[in-house]
Amino acid sequence: MVDDPGVFYKGELIYPEFSESETGYKGISKGKNGRYYGRITGLKNHGHVSVPRTFSTAEEAAAERAVFKLKLERQELAMPVPKLGRTPRGTGTPLPTHA
């Protein structure tokens, strides 16, 4: 019997992406509190987006990241925006350069 790490979303089997990272999954990191969280990078004009919630295992975080990424790609979710009052990346005052 094979342990299938996939998750079903609207009847479609979704697989998390694997990598050579510490957790073994692409975009999954361990937070300060020992729980795992996911991020999706490389989104056009967005940099990265954090997956909502944290999870007790890397497998759960990877599965949720896969579903969240699919929802963003299908435009079922609106693209998250920065927190109110946060200066968007690249638009702040540049730091002075030292000669």
Image: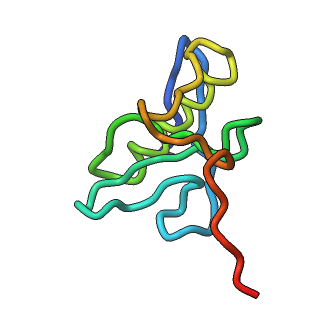
Residue 97, percent from left and from top: 71, 76
Q: Residue at x 76, y 35 (%)?
A: 44
Looking at the image, how many numbered discs can be counted on the residues? 0
Q: Residue furthest bottom?
A: 99
Residue 27, percent from left and from top: 56, 53
Residue 77, percent from left and from top: 55, 16
18 vs 32: above or below: above
Quadrant of the frame with the C terminus: bottom right
Query: Which of the 4 image quadrants contains residue 78?
Result: top right
Residue 26, percent from left and from top: 59, 54
44 vs 31: above or below: above
Q: Is residue 81 left or right of residue 94?
A: left
97 vs 50: above or below: below
Nearest the eye: 7 or 70: 70
Q: Residue at x 49, y 30 (%)?
A: 7
Q: Residue at x 32, y 44 (%)?
A: 54
